[in-house]
Amino acid sequence: MQASAKTTSARPTSAVILEAIRRYSVLLILLGIGLVFTLGSDRFLTPSNLMNIAVQTSIIAIIAIGMTFVILTAGIDLSVGSVVALCGALAAGLAVRQELGTFTGIGLALLAGAAVGVINGLLVVRGKMPPFVATLSTLAIARGLTLVYTEGRPISGIDERFTFLGSGEILGIATPVIILAIVFVIAYIVLRSTRFGNYVYATGGNEEVSRLAGVRTSIITLSVYIISGFLAALGGVLLVARLWSAQPNAAVGLELDAIAAPVLGGVSLFGGVGNVTGALVGAFILGILSNGLNLMGVPSFWQQVIKGVVLILAVMLDVFTKRRR
Amino acid sequence: MAETNDFLRMEGISKSFPGVQALQEVNFEVTRGEIHALVGENGAGKSTLMKVLTGALHLDEGRIILRGEPVEIHSPSDSQELGISMIHQELSLIPYLTVGKNVYLGREPRRRIPGFIDWKKLYSQTQELLGQINLDVRAWAEAQDLSIAQQQMVEVAKALSIEADLIAMDEPTSSLTDRETEVLFDVMRKLKDQGVAIIFITHRLEEVFEVSDRITVLRDGRHIATAPTAELNHNQVVQLMVGRELDNMYPYSETKERGVALQADDLADGQELHGVSLELQGGQILGVAGLVGAGRTALAETLFGLRQATAGEIHIDGQVVKLHSAKQAIEHGLGFVPEDRKLQGLFLNMAVRENITMSSTSLVSNFGFVNTNKANKLADEYVDKLDIRTPSLRQRIRNLSGGNQQKVIIARWLTLKPRVLILDEPTRGVDVGAKAEIHGLMRQLAEDGVAVLMISSELPEIIGVSDRILVMHEGRVTGRFERDEASQDMIMHAATGGDNNAS
Ligand SMILES: Nc1ncnc2c1ncn2[C@@H]1O[C@H](COP(=O)(O)OP(=O)(O)OP(=O)(O)O)[C@@H](O)[C@H]1O
Ligand SMILES: [Mg+2]
């Protein structure tokens, strides 16, 4: 028996409780907010409103899942809002104006999103630019290109196969929600069970160590920006499908929500910690907040303030419980 | 071409960094089934040589011949594929990943579906490896929850998991205590019997003589000598390393006590400390011995206000104080050189000058602006005093060798002229020459009236340096000795729980 190698197996109960709070803190917040709105408005807890929330949240949730990959590597992707607008416009424009058809239009738009991701990734990996600066530049460029391509005007006239993606239903469930579910499941499995997912965490945990262990961190980093770009493009397509037209100034500032969602859900901006479940829950907290506040008639200016406060509270709870470990 | 049965030959290896010739035409060979010790002062180029071998750095000149064939190693994965694994000097576990994920990072067992990891296999294999090195840690524990010594042993498991033919170990023992070191040596001997070649870097020469078959000495980036261990003795190795005869390793002189500077009564932190009392005299060095996990670091951190005491009192110069932060501790004249310099002590991306003058900005600034001249002068003074080897004051700390980083952090605290200085493993990873200098420095401080508390896992150091010795075991004091009555056996006995001859 050696006393030298003892594991910390017996923790005091207070630590166990704190650990539980830490682990499930976002869920608790989600339930808490839900409870407040249920009491505050009788229109909140109804099946149709819940489906409504799911539809409204799905686009931001999909983008937040892509963002999670980037943040896990200790990066950030500020370009997602612009990519949503650019790829939405491309999908609609290529389908309608260039008459390439809905499938080709959407396919090319998704590729364009991935391409922006490639550029972001190369700027970070090869250009050694801080992700913040690299993606801030592409944010401007993509928005500019959107305005150039659309000439500042909305593009409409998409066919019903396109709009089905935004407002259709399969077996009574709205299409965007189904797409979100598919994206979530894939992302969840990739992060949890694959080598790639493991390397995303490792790269974010310590890039140098990962590199020394033989992980090709540059490829991992490049890949997460591609994923983020691709999912932002998917979000853009869904947005167009829901609004029945592409708006050149759509999704301005959307990157804030896309970053707030994973952070709310416990994804650390320093990398290496968190998962897509957190991002999903975070996105739903934001979605429920705006929905509930709308129902309760809170002016939209105040909604912004409340969102900010919730973000601070959630992160503080996380920091506080973590420090006590 | 000369035929040799060397497993590895590195020929004419040169490598320079801006301002430093780290390696100059170094030749180095290792055969199968040998433990080859690589020694040299801090900054001699040991780590650089190993990094070149494992592809973490690119060589400027020279060639590497493995199994009789020249090889090109451009990346760590290249070297792994060639059957080379390395334990890096800096701890390199990823804190949030589990032990198992860390061990198999980059080489996860795969499932049939491409790209998927077989977690079950990964964890069971890890657990088995941990068992082989007697490490009582769960494979799915997060690395950040492990002690430094445990993390170091996980590094060993990581190197073993590669099943390499050549393992380079860069100071694997620096954060281990004697017991874990013995376990590691057993593992090394077993590997050696299996024909694995091991390169072993350490600053503890006793270890070199205990396990190695051959010794290679580097000095200032040059190859100085290679000889069978049996043909060399301790003093010869030291002389080869430093290029001169070294005087006393443990300079000692009686100092007079100047009254109690720091006193702790029944200190507890609710976790690792259970009622520790001690008295620290000005002008005296108190050595704190114990095994890893004995609560020594917890004691140091509590005294310095980094942990909150849940019971007990701390007196400084006779007054009860409650310390809630390092800042308060510093204001009370305390200094603390932490155990984990990377995490707690150094600003790796900042220059030597900033790292030295960081805590004493008031000394080097006028009206809130840092005065570069003053800062240079102060930094220069301590670079001189502690013989810190750096091409310039503006060199980034991360580029210094491990031992020189340690001196920088000690220098920082000395600029504050503390009245009580707590040092946690101050000579870990420090070469013999610098070690003697740090010992001399602590003695000098004591002579100047400073109260010094030194935590060390090296018994010869504890006995050689301390005026009084305190031994801890599982958060309690299990032994107190005066300098002339302590022996290694008595300390070991107390450190393993022995009987309670403490009050
Ligand atoms: N990345 C780097 N940039 C600049 N200089 C470096 C770099 N890495 C090492 N050096 C310098 O090269 C020399 C050799 O360093 P190295 O780390 O190989 O020494 P070492 O023998 O391992 O010392 P220690 O025993 O302290 O670990 C030192 O002078 C060091 O400052
Ligand atoms: Mg070294």
Image: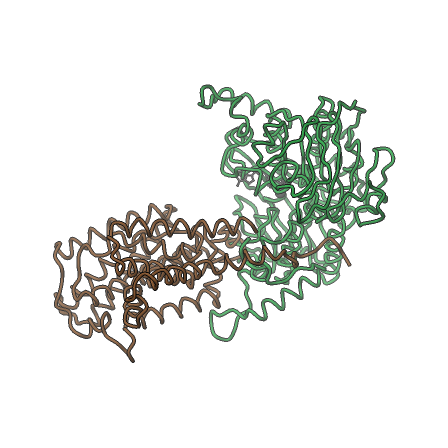
Q: Position of residue B244 (x, y in %)?
A: 73, 30
Q: Tell me: residue B49, above or below residue B393.
A: below
Q: Is residue B152 left or right of residue A324?
A: right
| Front position in the image: B320 or B488 | B320
Which residue is located at x 75 percent, y 32 percent?
B279
Q: In x, y percent, where is residue B501?
A: 85, 43
Q: Residue at x 46, y 51 (%)?
A: A317
Residue B310 higher or lower than B110, as above or below: above
Tally of marks: 0
Query: With A170 as the anchor, is B341 left or right in this view?
Result: right
Is residue B123 visible from the viewing direction of this image?
Answer: yes
Q: Quadrant of the C terminus of chain B?
A: top right
Residues B70 and A128: in front is A128
Which scheme is used to colour this image of the protein? by chain
Q: Colour of chain B?
A: green
Q: Position of residue B22 (x, y in %)?
A: 58, 38
Q: Does residue A285 sit above or below B414 in this rendering?
A: below
Which chain is displayed in brown in the rendered image? A
Image height of A168 relative to B175, above or below:
below
Quadrant of res B31: bottom right
Residue at left 51%, top 22%? B364
Can residue B40 be seen from the camera position used here?
no
Measured as percent of width and height from the top left, residue B105 is found at 54, 60
Q: Quadrant of ligand 2?
A: top right
Residue extending farthest to the right is: B485
Q: Say left or right for A90 vs A220.
A: left
